[in-house]
Amino acid sequence: MCGIVGYVGYRDCAGVLMDALSKLEYRGYDSAGIAVFDKGEISVAKSKGRLADLAEKMEKTGKPEGNAGIGHTRWATHGEPSDINSHPHSGERVTIVHNGIIENYKVLKDFLVKEGRCFKSDTDTEVVAQLLDYYYDGDPIATIAKVTRELEGSYALGIVFADFPDTVFAIRCESPLIVGIGENESFIASDVPAILKYTRNYYLLEHDEIAVLSRYSTSIYDLHYNKLNKELKTADWDMDAAEKGGYEHFMLKEIFEQPTAIKTTITPRIVDGLPNLEECGITMEKLSSYKQIFVVACGTAMHAGVVGRYVIEKLARVPVNVEIASEFRYRDPIVSEGDLVIIISQSGETADSLAAMRLAKKLGAETLAIVNAKGSSIAREADMLIYTHAGPEIAVASTKAYMVQIAVMYLFAFEMALAKGMISEDECRRLTSLLQQTPDTIEKLLEHKETAQYIASSLINADSLLYIGRGLDYALSMEGSLKLKEISYIHSESYAAGELKHGTISLIHDGMPVIAVATQSALFDKTISNIKEVKARGAKVVIVCRDSYNPDTDVADHKFGLPDEVEDLLMPMAAVVPLQLIAYYTSVLRGNDVDKPRNLAKSVTVE
Ligand code: AGP
């Protein structure tokens, strides 16, 4: 996600901003910029690319000289990575940097265009800058209060007004923002690492609080101009820990970011309680026309496709083929006009997935990409595009990206089923509401992370594990197995529980761990029978099932319970969390490099 910094003090502001932004690079970004009061004027420098590119540009064009300003690293959500879409964005008298998503930016932009405002960029942020400028009446706090009452979505804003030199304003809603307090200097930042070099003391800005940083004072107000007395906090993190937000590893941080990632991804795609993917080029007419769907991806992204297949086929009754991209591209697939090929990719740069998409287009199919990295190759070349808004995923083992990929597949399946007339609008609204409840479900599950840690301690000396399940539980077992393998280095494989007796059950030996996913009510008794088959042959069974089921000793040795109220169809959003945590803790307990496991790269851009 984006990074915001601001500074007011006695130092070279541009230098401080660039240094502070470098401490936020871990958040991932595709462009950067700063705005500094230079001899009383706001001077802006911004560039697509890395901070080094911005520094190089300033070497050529001249670095703004001054002691107050704002800075930004952009993780694109609206508008491709480019110089013009980089922050800061300006009106005539107001310049801002923004982290978050303004969900009603189109309505606001239409209003401003009608009022004669011209826009340079494709961003939602520029709409905020222009709206601040439109309402600005000489009182920055009153203007900020007025504008933020019109905004819907998430935002952390750093703001400078031309006629308030050497003063930085800030406000937040959802997106985090802190106010750092040093000796005769103050800061704003999206996260603690940005200011640790200068101070450990900071205020946590709460929702709808306005910070005013000037040369000799820092104040915080509510929207009614009341000055607030805030508790000054002290960061006791070291630098490395700080970049992980206090988590030991990026992977754990990203597992815990999943509720927010789901909300940020699905909320803009739900209108009046129904899925609405129009902004991605997906109309109801298109959805009703497809007769066959291919989902093509690699690794975890492919596993998200397997979940999608079950849901789309169950609800929309359209056949879905899930394909490994490296196989699809070489097997001369039977794909034709009218088919839809969905490419799922976190990085948007996976070579096999990109090649598969190009082949699908050559064969006449329409392509839809579900991608996390903005402006990536797959995103740019697809006919239709749904961005997931998980923010940058740093850990090699994908967790939050997988979660938002299946969330998007659910939205797609609901809307396709509605378009095909297979479900009513009421049922579609009900299912969509269930999906919107999953972040809260995951929040509750994450409170039981110690259960996963205890289960992991029983796995760390295993030579090999089986993950088993039926239906959606089988789809989940694929992801659970890959997570464990890639970060613990313990061999495992996922197996359809009903297929075990056709050979693989011969692998079961005394003490062999088997992780059984049993959430699907219609298949529950059969899955329990399969579990008993392995248990009877000496397996140590971990069962992932609803809280209300208490397994006898002839069924399981450990249990990770899931909320009873989650419906079968949505269970993957819940059941994957213990599987992620079990893999994470197994890796930690084995002393592995959890975030950068051996032999792996985050994005496989080669064949
Ligand atoms: C995920 O845990 C793996 N690291 C890997 O399987 C990954 O999902 C796969 O390489 C696909 O990457 P992509 O989503 O960026 O295309």
Image (cartoon, rainbow, N blue to C red):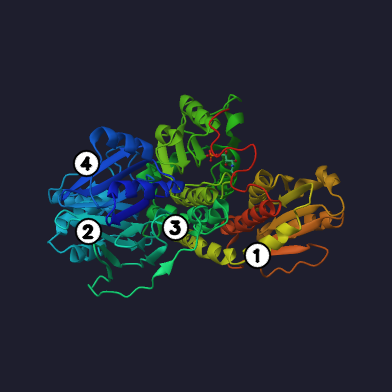
Identity of the residue drawn at 51% across and 28% down: 355
| Between discs 4 and 1, the one toward the N terminus | 4
Type of residue at label 3?
A: Lys
- Residues at discs 1 and 2 in contact (Cβ within 8 Å): no
Report x, y in % for residue 404. 50, 51
Type of residue at label 4?
A: Lys
Report x, y in % for residue 53. 35, 35
Question: Which mark is in front, 1 or 2?
Answer: 2
Q: Is residue 506 visible?
A: yes
Front residue of 522/492: it is 492
| Between discs 3 and 2, the one toward the N terminus | 2
The dot on residue 263 is 3
| Between discs 3 and 1, the one toward the N terminus | 3
Instruction: Name the quarter where the C terminus is drawn.
Output: top right
Disc 4 to disc 2, how far (Cα)? Answer: 25 Å
Q: Which residue is mark 1?
A: 450
Report x, y in % for residue 586. 69, 53
Q: Which residue is mark 4?
A: 120
